[in-house]
Amino acid sequence: MKRIKKGSGEPRSGDKIWLGAYPKGVPAEINLGEYRSVVEVLEKSIQRFHDRPAFANMGARLSYAALDRQTRDFAAFLQQELGLPKGARVAIMLPNLLQY
């Protein structure tokens, strides 16, 4: 196993090198008890950042408001057009791009 000297500039196991790419003001740690579920995180983010970008990819942007509309529209389609019951699980396999 290769030993890396402290301060050599090379990442060590356990280093969180991605933190260097975080924009100013983005914390390295979060309060895990702040939200009860991922759904609550999304709902509060939609309320708080309504007009701000939720996603940006290849020149396309999607605001939190647009994300909310599109996810609700898609859920309604699944329930009303395909007859899936509320809470049904759906697997979606698409490229990870906003265009899809």
Image (cartoon, rainbow, N blue to C red):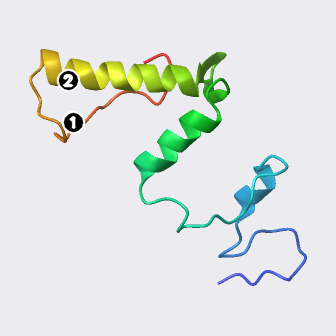
Q: Residue at x 77, y 49 (%)?
A: 21
Q: Residue at x 41, y 20 (%)?
A: 70
Residue that numbered label 1 is attached to? 90
Q: Earlier in the sequence, mark 2 or mark 1?
A: 2
Residue 70 horizontal side relative to residue 51, left or right: left
Q: What is the secondary structure assignment of the residue under circle 2?
A: helix
The tally of labels here is 2
Q: Residue furthest left?
A: 83
The C terminus appears in which quarter of the rendering? Answer: top left
Determine the CA span between mark 2 and mark 1.
9 Å
Name the residue nearer the viewer: 53 or 33. Answer: 33
Give residue 11's position: percent from left, percent from top: 75, 69
Give residue 41's position: percent from left, percent from top: 51, 48
Name the residue nearer the viewer: 81 or 61. Answer: 81
Residue that numbered label 2 is attached to? 78
Q: Are marks 2 and 1 in contact (CB under 8 Å)?
A: yes
Q: Residue at x 70, y 66 (%)?
A: 16
Which amino acid does the dot numbered 2 rest on?
Leu
Residue 51 position by quadrant: top right
Name the residue nearer the viewer: 27 or 69. Answer: 69
Relative to 45, does residue 37 appear above or below in the rendering? Answer: below
Give residue 40's position: percent from left, percent from top: 45, 49
Give residue 88's position: percent from left, percent from top: 16, 39
Residue 87 position by quadrant: top left
Q: Residue at x 17, y 24 (%)?
A: 79
Q: Nearer the viewer, mark 2 or mark 1?
A: 2
Residue 81 horizontal side relative to residue 63, left or right: left
Relative to 51, does residue 15 appear above or below in the rendering? Answer: below
Q: What is the secondary structure assignment of the residue under circle 1?
A: loop
Relative to 50, does residue 77 appear above or below in the rendering? Answer: above
